[in-house]
Image (cartoon, coloured by chain):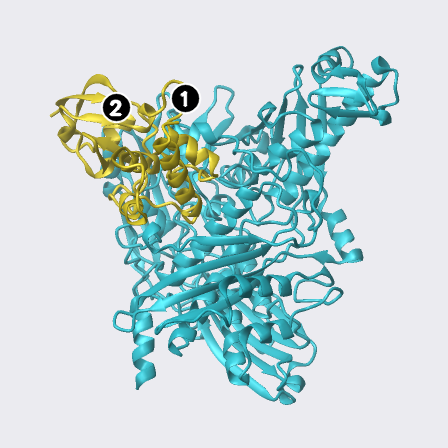
Chain colours: A yellow, B cyan
């Protein structure tokens, strides 16, 4: 049995069908071809598949495609404005926070939601926002630099 | 070392490949989509040790949508391995760990694959399972590899079995020296198995091309090693196999050992594609990955050291039992390195250490980031503090007392041309506030040092192709996983050819087109590919000068290249655009292609004659131990390194921070837990704890002005050494806080609490 799912992805209305058991991650990656959202643990532990679902960051691997009917979703592909990168994306590049880059899309989505809420996050705010995103390359030091740089730039309106 | 005058080398120019990574481009192996591709899956052993009596695939083959089911019977009778050739790609007579591949399926959908795998009927005859690396050496232990001989160099009186490699480190007369020592400290240390847990799942995809060649896509750190074994195991020549490297979502040595790393996923996938006559792609599930792919082995280390009252070390005796797991894998090399490093990197006149690498019914040892090093350093550097405590000496002072000087030898290095160990120790002590910071109750401070000896290894080449517009394309055999190939190496080509970094492209590895290379392994990306790229760029520059000389009416020796212009030195008005010369080459030699090599033998000879400058490091930290829960919180962490000249400082820092974080994970929480049947109890990320941002301190990295290393511009390898000191630095800080010495990892709340309680009784 296939379900019809109508949703908005990165501002575009999309309709497709999915099995009731299909995860939102697989639906995005394999049905809608949004490969930017990464598959890793499939158990909601690593954050590589983080997307923004009705304004909230979620692990799309443990959400069902069926639950996304009517939802408004933003994936990493929806962040840049043409060739102009979102400040969070730019900050990750500028600080050297992108090593292998596999956690990066999920990380950026979590950070975007945080900085949309406040551009003056406390250390606790940051910890809470990204404690569900595992990075194995950086030791988090340069990721923290990236978050702070992006916050500064967004606060400055640049 | 003195600051050199360079234009781009030495700057932290944003990495090549950064934009595609932040916009979520589908560049990784997992993002591959081959037209008409089938899904592949692997049936793994249900026993950690058993005879395979029979395999019946008939029911699986009959399922609609199944295109191929393969077992060992479908492949040539050829085994693989790195030092010992002890392994089939699909189990033939026996299975030896729970991840051992037994059969594989290619089908229309992942669901059909799963269903078909369940329908393969394997009859096993279970055999006794051995998981303890010391017990496996005893005569009564079950034999894991009936047809593998014991290592030829084993001492005649060694009554052991299940040993696949033996390393003796014997120097001087340690018995005599030990007898003359004032103080002897004798300890046993043990480290646990961890999995590198790179985030991107391992993949393999294969397609038989119309001309019969096989293309394999792999997210492997060593694509040429993959090619070698795919060809060998399928019985086809190397020119019929092409391996294309996808971008890698992390490796850390876990994807570094050819097909050994992924338990032969690549040749299995190729075999499926041949049988199915369709492209096939296999993606490992994370839990499947934890149980089946290569890991950082556990080691048990006996260490005994004799010292004089003044703190001079006179002798060390030791024994290493290094767990290779079910097959030799990378065990021989990692175990040898662990054994050498148990001798330390201080002055050590008399040593007797025996290293045994043994088979057990567990995951196979891989070259995970600094293979053998963190294990040995946990023992060595914890032991240094135990000795200092017994002598009543300050740990920093004790280390400095035994630090080698230029001209001295340390184990694994015949002659040191210079030594920054003391400088790193003093700097780390200063940065952490050694002896100055007032610690609160339950807080402690620890220091530990490390080295990662750069010695002989495979060479490698580079090609720098100069396009007619003056931009260049660099071909090397190493892949980018956040390391030198797209951080430092583009800077080298830009530097030597006087062009902007944005005009340089370093292409990914295609075994049909790239120069052969041992892969992005062993902290050698910059040493090998950086050296080769520099020489290739200089070769290209010389060819350009030769072509430009006539037009500029000057000798090639009088030319220079800057800002995309070739000009006469001292007469900037006499110049010609690089693009013009590169275009003119079409009518002369076709294309300017510079070649360069890292000649390993030449490097060896040079180091033998002049001595070598090795990377050294000291890490120090402050921890707080919760006496009620055993939880350890790191309050401050400093990492001081001499990596020679940093070609891309941010990348070097990133490597050090990442390596440090991996070892902090191993120190505090990471472990692959298994039961006596060899079953992994925590295969998924739900149970395999890794550091998240909450538990990580900010790692304060300091790159001291060290000494020039063997790499280009005097650089040294930076990828692994950061893994070496953290285990002991944290253990030493816990000892300083509590007076309890924990000799078995991890330093998890459970183990720390047990240590605190045992100390009370």
The reply to whether dot 1 and dot 2 touch (C-beta < 8 Å) is no
Per the model, the C-alpha gap separating discs 1 and 2 is 27 Å
Q: Which residue in the structure is indicated by mark 2?
A: A31
At x 65%, y 89%, the residue is B180
Q: Are marks 1 and 2 on the same chain?
A: yes
Above or below B209: residue B702: below
The quadrant in which the C terminus of chain B is found is bottom left
**Disc 1: host chain:** A
Q: Nearer the viewer, residue B428 or B331?
A: B428
Residue B585 x, y percent position in the rendering: 75, 14
Residue A45 image offset from top left, x and y in percent: 27, 46
Q: In the rendered view, would you say B208 is above or below B134?
A: above
- Pick the residue in front: B623 or B32: B623
Q: Nearer the viewer, residue A10 or B165?
A: A10
First reached walking from the N terminus: tag 1 or tag 2: 2
Q: Is residue A28 left or right of residue B312?
A: left
Numbered badge on residue A84: 1
Residue B132 at x, y percent in the picture: 39, 69
Residue located farthest toward the front when viewing the structure as drawn: A156
Quarter occupied by residue A8: top left
Q: Visible in this render: residue B560?
A: yes
- The secondary element bearing badge 1 is classed as loop
């Amino acid at each position: 049995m296939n379900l019809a799912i109508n949703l908005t992805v990165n501002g575009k209305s999309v309709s497709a069908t999915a099995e009731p058991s299909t995860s939102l991650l697989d639906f995005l990656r394999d049905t809608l071809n949004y490969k930017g959202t990464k598959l890793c643990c499939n158990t909601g532990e690593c954050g590589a598949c983080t997307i923004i679902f009705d304004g909230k960051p979620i692990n799309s691997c443990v959400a069902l495609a069926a639950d996304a009917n009517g939802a408004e979703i933003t994936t990493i592909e929806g962040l840049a404005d043409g060739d102009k990168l979102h400040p969070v994306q730019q900050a990750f590049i500028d600080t050297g926070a992108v090593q292998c880059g596999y956690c990066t899309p999920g990380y950026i989505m979590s950070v975007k939601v945080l900085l949309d809420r406040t551009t003056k996050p406390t250390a606790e705010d940051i910890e809470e926002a990204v404690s569900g995103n595992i990075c194995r390359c950086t030791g988090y030091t340069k990721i923290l630099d990236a978050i702070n740089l992006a916050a500064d730039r967004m606060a400055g309106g640049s | 070392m003195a600051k050199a005058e360079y234009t781009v080398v030495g700057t932290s120019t944003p990495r090549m490949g950064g934009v595609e990574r932040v916009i979520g481009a589908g560049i990784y192996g997992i993002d591959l989509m081959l037209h008409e591709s089938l899904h592949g899956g692997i049936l793994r052993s249900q026993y950690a040790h058993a005879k395979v009596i029979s395999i019946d695939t008939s029911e699986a083959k009959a399922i609609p949508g199944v295109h191929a089911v393969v077992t060992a019977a479908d492949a040539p009778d050829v085994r693989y391995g790195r030092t010992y050739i002890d392994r089939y790609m699909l189990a033939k007579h026996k299975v030896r760990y729970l991840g051992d591949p037994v059969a594989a399926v290619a089908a229309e959908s992942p669901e059909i694959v799963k269903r078909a795998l369940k329908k393969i009927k394997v009859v096993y005859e279970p055999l006794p399972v051995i998981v303890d690396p010391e017990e496996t050496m005893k005569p009564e232990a079950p034999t894991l590899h009936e047809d593998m001989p014991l290592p030829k160099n084993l001492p005649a009186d060694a009554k052991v079995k299940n040993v696949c490699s033996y390393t003796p480190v014997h120097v001087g007369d340690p018995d005599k020296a030990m007898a003359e020592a004032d103080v002897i400290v004798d300890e046993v240390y043990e480290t646990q198995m961890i999995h590198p847990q790179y985030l991107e799942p391992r993949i393999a995809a294969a397609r038989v091309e119309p001309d019969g060649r096989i293309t394999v896509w792999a997210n492997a750190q060593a694509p040429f090693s993959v090619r070698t074994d795919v060809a060998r195991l399928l019985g086809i020549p190397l020119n019929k196999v092409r391996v294309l490297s996808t971008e890698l979502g992390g490796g850390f040595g876990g994807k570094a050992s050819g097909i050994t790393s992924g338990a032969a996923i690549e040749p299995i996938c190729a075999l499926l594609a041949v049988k199915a006559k369709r492209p096939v792609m296999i993606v490992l599930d994370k839990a499947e990955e934890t149980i089946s792919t290569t890991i950082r082995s556990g080691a048990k280390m006996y260490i005994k050291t004799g010292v004089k009252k003044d703190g001079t070390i006179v002798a060390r005796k030791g024994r290493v039992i290094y767990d290779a797991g079910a097959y030799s894998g990378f065990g021989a090399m990692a175990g040898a390195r662990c054994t050498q490093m148990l001798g330390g990197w201080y002055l050590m006149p008399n040593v007797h250490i025996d290293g045994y690498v043994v088979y057990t019914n567990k995951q196979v040892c891989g070259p995970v980031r600094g293979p053998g090093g963190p294990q040995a350093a946990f023992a060595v550097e914890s032991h240094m503090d135990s000795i200092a405590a017994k002598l009543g000496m300050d740990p920093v002072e004790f280390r400095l007392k035994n630090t080698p000087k230029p001209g001295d030898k340390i184990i694994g290095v015949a002659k040191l041309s210079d030594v920054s160990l003391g400088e790193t120790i003093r700097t780390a002590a200063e940065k952490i506030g050694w002896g100055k910071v007032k610690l609160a109750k339950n807080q402690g401070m620890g220091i530990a040092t490390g080295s990662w000896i750069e010695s002989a290894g495979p060479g490698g080449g580079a090609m720098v192709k100069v396009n007619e517009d003056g931009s260049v394309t660099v071909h090397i055999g190493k892949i980018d996983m956040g390391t030198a190939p797209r951080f430092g190496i583009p800077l080298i080509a830009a530097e030597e050819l006087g062009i902007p970094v944005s005009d340089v492209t370093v292409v990914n590895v295609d075994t049909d087109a790239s120069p052969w290379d041992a892969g992005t392994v062993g902290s050698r990306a910059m040493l090998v590919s950086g050296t080769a790229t520099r020489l290739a760029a200089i070769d290209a520059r010389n060819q350009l000068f030769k072509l430009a000389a006539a037009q500029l009416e000057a000798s090639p020796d009088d030319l220079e290249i800057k800002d995309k212009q070739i000009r006469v030195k001292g007469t900037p008005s006499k110049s010609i655009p690089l693009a013009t010369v590169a275009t003119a080459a079409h009518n002369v030699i076709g294309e300017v292609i510079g070649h360069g090599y890292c000649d390993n033998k030449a490097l060896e000879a040079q180091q033998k004659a002049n001595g070598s400058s090795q990377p050294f490091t000291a890490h120090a930290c402050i921890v707080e131990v919760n006496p009620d829960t055993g939880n350890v919180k790191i309050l401050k962490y400093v990492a001081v390194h001499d990596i020679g000249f940093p070609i891309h400082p941010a990348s070097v820092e990133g490597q050090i921070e990442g390596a440090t974080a991996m070892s902090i994970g191993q120190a505090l929480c990471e472990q692959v837990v298994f039961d006596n049947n060899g079953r992994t109890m925590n295969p998924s990320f739900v149970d395999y704890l890794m550091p998240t941002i909450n538990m990580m301190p900010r790692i304060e990295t300091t790159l001291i002005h060290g000494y020039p290393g063997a790499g280009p511009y005097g650089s040294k390898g930076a990828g692994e050494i950061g893994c070496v000191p953290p285990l002991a630095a944290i253990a030493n800080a816990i000892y300083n806080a509590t007076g309890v010495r924990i000799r078995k990892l991890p330093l998890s709340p459970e183990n720390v609490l047990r240590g605190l309680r045992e100390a009370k009784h």
